[in-house]
Image (tube, rainbow, N blue to C red):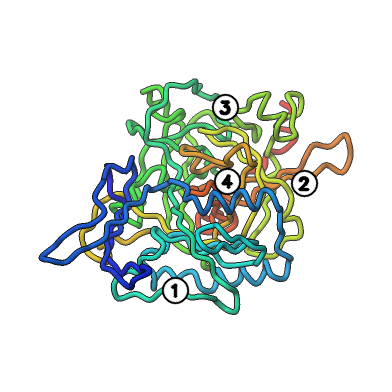
């Protein structure tokens, strides 16, 4: 059992306030005690399972699926602007705050009473417990009502060993499994890029290569990157060299990204791995018309976009090709390590992801899973004629997900600007060779 978060506070009960512990763990709840005695003082114990979906979130999810309420554009813009303006200060003021998002619906009495009312949703680790020396969550922010639910955010690398098929790809393809040499931690080859000098590389998440629990600033050091990841086949098929990693903000957008320079298996087209016939059919493609991203086209969600309702897809090393929709631009989430910190508040500083995109999958399929960190997310513009293919616009890169099954995505333009690269354009004359 690993302890993700531990803090003390005041628990609000029907008969008044009571001192309480909140213990967030990452495995089965094996703690049976509900109270702890210390020098004659009684403390309530609240044990929460990290990554578990709360009953309230399940009720809200079912309500949203049944009623399909939509927030009008004016209210949605107001909520998104509010998130961008206030997320940083909210995280600073509330150590138990995990995610800041928005919803078309407001939940009361832990999901017993749900109504259509656009709200800012404050996801915390434990409802009803206010950490010592902190205030309760605000009832409204900038005139918008808040709704407090329980939920967590976690990153999408994969440090487990899975015995499944994974080929040494030559040439390389987007969506491939990649990792650091000799390490059992994997992520996804996101997309191919070019530097100002014309060198070809690819981007993925920095947390695929670095442990943020020991440092928030990954070092700028060279090391070899392999494809597939060492975890899959215990081989080290080197494909590139790490150039740099960043974890910093660009115009209030948190960027967690790495740049790898290619040394071998350079592609001539923007093709994807991990495609199955069933996934192609379910996402609107077919075996004769597979997705391809050779144009390098992007859509900048630092600016208002008119086609934000267009469907999204991603191809990740773990879950392959999936389809979803953009729910929100501007959400914020807090990532905690799994080290135990015994002080209150914890001494280890969590990593805050500000101004992110939030993607929802379909009712039958989550949009991304562990191992998909680094996968690019694309919006699909329908073709203008039967002879044309769908047009893919890259909008961001998968970094993690929530306990209520949404996917957190960093907008693509801040990534490109901080790494000082452009998406690779594969010219038609080369693709026809």
Crowd around label 4: few <14 · some 14–19 · many ≥20 (10 Å) = some
The residue at 58%/44% (across/down) is 376
Q: Is residue 230 visible?
A: yes
Looking at the rendered image, the disc whose residue lies closer to the viewer, 1 or 2, is: 1
Residue underneath mark 1: 89
Looking at the rendered image, the disc whose residue lies closer to the viewer, 3 or 1, is: 1
Residue underneath mark 4: 194
Looking at the rendered image, the disc whose residue lies closer to the viewer, 1 or 4, is: 1
Quarter of the picture containing the C terminus is top right
Mark 3 secondary-structure assignment: loop
Mark 2 touches mark 4? (CB < 8 Å): no
Residue underneath mark 2: 381
Mark 3 touches mark 4? (CB < 8 Å): no
Residue underneath mark 3: 171
Mark 2 secondary-structure assignment: strand
Please identify the quarter of the rendering in which residue 37 is found: bottom left
């Amino acid at each position: 059992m690993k302890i993700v978060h531990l803090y003390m506070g005041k628990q609000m009960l029907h008969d008044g306030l009571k001192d309480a512990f909140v213990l967030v763990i990452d495995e089965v709840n094996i703690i049976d005690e509900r109270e702890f005695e210390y020098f004659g003082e009684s403390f309530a114990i609240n044990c929460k399972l990290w990554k578990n979906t709360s009953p309230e979130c399940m009720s809200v999810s079912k309500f949203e699926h049944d009623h399909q309420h939509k927030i009008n554009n004016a209210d949605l813009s107001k909520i998104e602007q509010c998130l961008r303006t206030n997320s940083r200060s909210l995280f600073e003021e509330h150590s138990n705050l995990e995610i800041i998002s928005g919803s078309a619906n407001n939940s009361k009495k832990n999901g017993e009473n749900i109504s259509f009312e656009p709200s800012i949703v404050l996801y915390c680790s434990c409802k009803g417990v206010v950490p010592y020396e902190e205030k309760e969550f605000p009832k409204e922010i900038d005139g918008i009502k808040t709704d407090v639910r329980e939920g967590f955010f976690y990153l999408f690398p994969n440090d487990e060993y899975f015995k499944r098929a994974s080929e040494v790809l030559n040439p390389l393809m987007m969506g491939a499994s990649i990792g650091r040499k000799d390490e059992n931690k994997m992520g996804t080859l996101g997309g191919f890029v070019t530097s100002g000098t014309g060198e070809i590389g690819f981007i993925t998440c920095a947390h695929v290569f670095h442990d943020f629990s020991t440092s928030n600033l990954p070092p700028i050091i060279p090391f070899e990157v392999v494809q597939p990841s060492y975890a899959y086949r215990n081989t080290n098929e080197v494909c590139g060299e790490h150039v740099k990693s960043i974890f910093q903000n660009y115009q209030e957008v948190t960027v967690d990204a790495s740049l790898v320079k290619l040394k071998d298996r350079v592609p001539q087209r923007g093709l994807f791995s991990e495609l199955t016939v069933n996934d192609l059919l379910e996402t609107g493609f077919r075996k004769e018309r597979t997705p391809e991203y050779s144009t390098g086209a992007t859509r900048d969600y630092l600016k208002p976009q008119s086609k934000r309702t267009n469907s999204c897809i991603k191809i990740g090393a773990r879950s392959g090709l999936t389809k979803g929709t953009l729910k929100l631009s501007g959400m914020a989430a807090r990532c905690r390590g799994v080290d135990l910190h015994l002080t209150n508040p914890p001494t280890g500083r969590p990593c805050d992801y500000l101004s992110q995109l939030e993607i929802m999958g379909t009712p039958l399929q989550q949009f991304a899973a562990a191992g998909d960190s680094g996968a690019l997310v694309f919006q699909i513009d329908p073709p203008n004629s039967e002879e044309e293919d769908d047009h893919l616009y890259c909008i961001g890169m998968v970094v993690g997900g929530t306990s209520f099954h949404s996917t957190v995505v960093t907008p693509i333009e801040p990534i490109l600007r901080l790494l000082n690269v452009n998406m690779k354009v594969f010219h038609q004359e080369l693709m026809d060779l």
